[in-house]
Image (cartoon, rainbow, N blue to C red):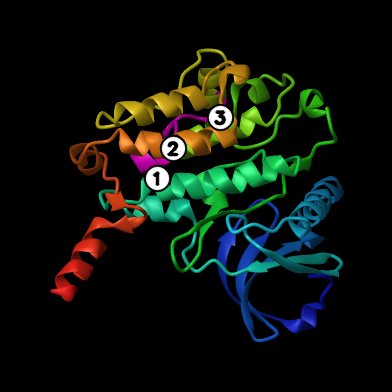
Amino acid sequence: MGTLDFSELQLGRPVGAGRSGSTFSAQWGGRHVAAKVVDLSQNSKALAQELLREFRREEEVASALRHPNVVQFLGSASAPPRYCLVFEFMAGGSLAELLRRSKKTPLDWFQLATDVAQGVAYLHEHSVLHRDLKSSNVLLDARGAAKIADFGLSCVLELGRSADLTAETGTYGWMAPEVIRHESYSSKADVYSFAVVLWELLARDVPFKGQTPMQTAMAVAEQQMRPALPRQTPPKIAELIEHCWNQDPTRRPDFSSILKVLPFVKQSLSKTDFKNAAILYTVCGLALHVLRRGLRASH
């Protein structure tokens, strides 16, 4: 990890775009990587300064992280007005893309939920708040493992400083009510966003679809509205989601508690619950159809 030269990178096709720039499939030293390129030449001075701050923040945060459920940072390149962050390439694309593609296909809901929870738990253990957790910021590797990405809006907390955060940061459909209302907030704001990701895994849709950002903000912060859970949602999953997006942040669980409860939630489901909610039925991490195939092959 460290500083590299733009000439070392061979940029290929674009694989994603955001406010700050585009991400490309790229080659670096014989390795397939993802290169997030920020070009400030087309921006106003104020926006360029803001985007450069985001770039530096993401570089600082990502370079200190190493976890199986966090996208691995590999290095950065600077050649003003162009800047680049290099990460491991995530061949599975984003969780958002998977959900839009797989409207009816059973997904391993519990494994994806656990991957995301483990990634964010690690961030919180290292005093990092993500602040923009959503399915498009969760990437999948070639095996389908989920990893947390995009730390441009993240912040590192000094001990005891969590209650001082009041900036409005994130995307409204996933944003906790206390953040929308510019009140002080803590790591529990990420727990709220996680609940919306769990909802996405069930609904395979965008929260508050058809509403303007302002309508969504008012609905969440003032009217205490949440996206409607699908009719076939198993009761224990509904209970977990409702705990995580509680209006009162102090009543939301932390990620260590979420990780402890997920296996018990899974055990509470019947095979019919799995089928109706389009959740892949797994035994000790093995999909049932894979298990059956292996058993048939052994006879």
Closer to us: 195 or 280: 280
Residue at figure coordinates x 26%, y 28% from the top left: 231
Labels in figure, total:
3
Closer to us: 238 or 3: 238
Residue 293 versus residue 272 in the image, above or below:
below
Relative to 297, 35 lies left or right? right
Closer to us: 253 or 4: 253
Q: Which one is closest to the eye, mark 3 or mark 1?
A: 1
| Disc 1, SS | helix
What distance separates the C-alpha of mark 2 from that of mark 3? 16 Å
What distance separates the C-alpha of mark 2 from that of mark 1? 7 Å
Q: Amino acid at mark 3?
A: Tyr
Relative to 202, 27 lies left or right? right
Task: Say if mark 3 contacts mark 1, CB within 8 Å.
Answer: no
The verdict on residue 203 being magenta is yes
Task: Say if mark 2 contacts mark 1, CB within 8 Å.
Answer: yes
Counting residues from the N terminus, which is met first, the one under dot 2 or under dot 3?
3
Counting residues from the N terminus, which is met first, the one under dot 2 or under dot 1?
1
Q: Amino acid at mark 2?
A: Leu
Relative to 120, 41 lies left or right? right
Q: Amino acid at mark 1?
A: Phe
Magenta stretch prevailing secondary structure:
loop
Residue at figure coordinates x 61%, y 70% from the top left: 24
| Label at residue 262 | 2
Q: Which one is closest to the eye, mark 2 or mark 1?
A: 2
Q: Which residue is the site of mark 3?
A: 192
| Label at residue 110 | 1
Q: Quadrant of the rendered structure where residue 32 is?
A: bottom right
Range covered by the magenta-colored residues: 200-214
